[in-house]
Image: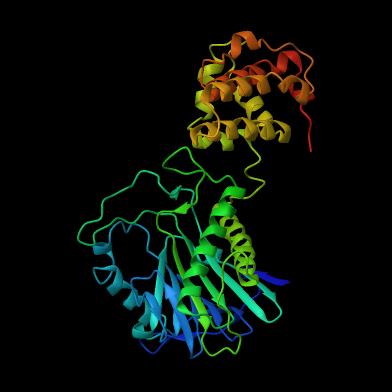
Amino acid sequence: MTSRTTNGADMDADPSKAESGTERESVLLFETTGKEKVYRFSDSILVSLPQGHKTLTTSWLNGGYREDVRAVFNHMIPKGKHAPKELEGGSVPAYLRIIAERLGVDPDTSSGLLTAANMDNVAIVTKSFRGVEVTAVMTAGIEVNGGRVGDPASYYQEDGSHQFIQGTINMILIIGADLPEYAMARAIITASEAKAAALQQLMAPSRYSKGIATGSGTDMVAVVCDGASSLKLTDAGQHSKLGELIGKAVIECTHKALELQSDLTVLSQRDMLVRLERFEISEADYWKVASGLNGANRKAAFLKVLREMSKNPVLVGATGTILHIVDEISWGLIPETAGRRVAVSLMKTLPGILGIDDSVPFDELADEKDCIIDNWVRVTAWMAKNCESKGLCSQVPQE
């Protein structure tokens, strides 16, 4: 299996004609072996399609299954727009038609996705195997809108009205083979599972619950396949090679897009405080707890030590273990009483795994009857507060 990736660093100019007849600057970012071309405009990504292609999209403009779409675009909504009526044209379908015309394509044979992400942060990843090529084109941002499926709703839609909520993962998936409609629908399932898997790998937090995000509430997708291809594939599930290519392309592309748009990476997640954000634990919460513990109350010094300790990879690993116990309790996989007991027992091993010789007063800090997060904050707050006087920071292992 081979792969290609790009974030648009190498670019060849290829301007498109705007509706007024003047040239609007565009950049050719990528071309597949099937001659699908990916262009970037200042506020849009446009994928031009040769004749004979099939599309299955979640767009308001020519969405669903179509065999006449010649262009799919991903467009950045202007800042400050909070409802469809605020858009030019007064509705989402009308606005998408206006954007299509400005991009120099026919609105009747185009389909468009909407996002708040910057088009400079597009990621493109291609995976191929024995003539089968899959290309994912994605923008992604979930720092505001990341959610876990089943989280509380933000609004009740009635008569087509809804709100714009910033933060979206939009993907255009280009498959260099001919697929029947049902296989294209299965490709959306596989791609959605891959996106959720990437977010799980990053432990990306939901902003609407204490769960791990599976996407955002505004994600959109377009699947494109080549109806004129001699290569006929009927299975896009996980067991098929096509499903594997889709999964790997989307996972890698999700990582790249989130890094470009949100600075969300595996390295940024190596931080105890970052991991605790989804449980609404902040530095202020730590100081509130620490100020009631024994030791000198010097806020600036405490926060400095806390931030240093928070990035310790061993402590991050221990944090992940503790939080997974909390998750498994919430999922019903572990009884709460047993989970609390195990969590407190693991906390008592911290001095050993961190190389701390000083005695930590666990009898005062940890109680199996308290919630796991409260116990964790007290224990680690004590460590941060007593670090300077007891030399604990100097014992923190570094990578």
Which quadrant of the view contains residue 242?
Answer: bottom right
Left or right side of 324 for 355: right
In the picture as drawn, the residue positioned furthest to the left comes out as 159
Left or right side of 32 for 25: left
- Residue 109: % across, % down: 38, 85
Closest to the observer, 178 or 94: 178
Placement of 347 over or under 107, stated as above or below: above
- Residue 225: % across, % down: 52, 80
- Residue 117: % across, % down: 47, 60
Closest to the observer, 343 or 391: 343
Placement of 327 over or under 33, stated as above or below: above
Taking the spot 51% from the left edge, 30% from the top edge, the residue there is 282
Closest to the observer, 21 or 127: 127
Look at the image and tell me whether residue 229 can be seen.
yes
Taking the spot 53% from the left edge, 11% from the top edge, the residue there is 292
Quarter occupied by the N terminus: bottom right
- Residue 327: % across, % down: 54, 35
Quarter occupied by the C terminus: top right
Taking the spot 60% from the left edge, 64% from the top edge, the residue there is 238
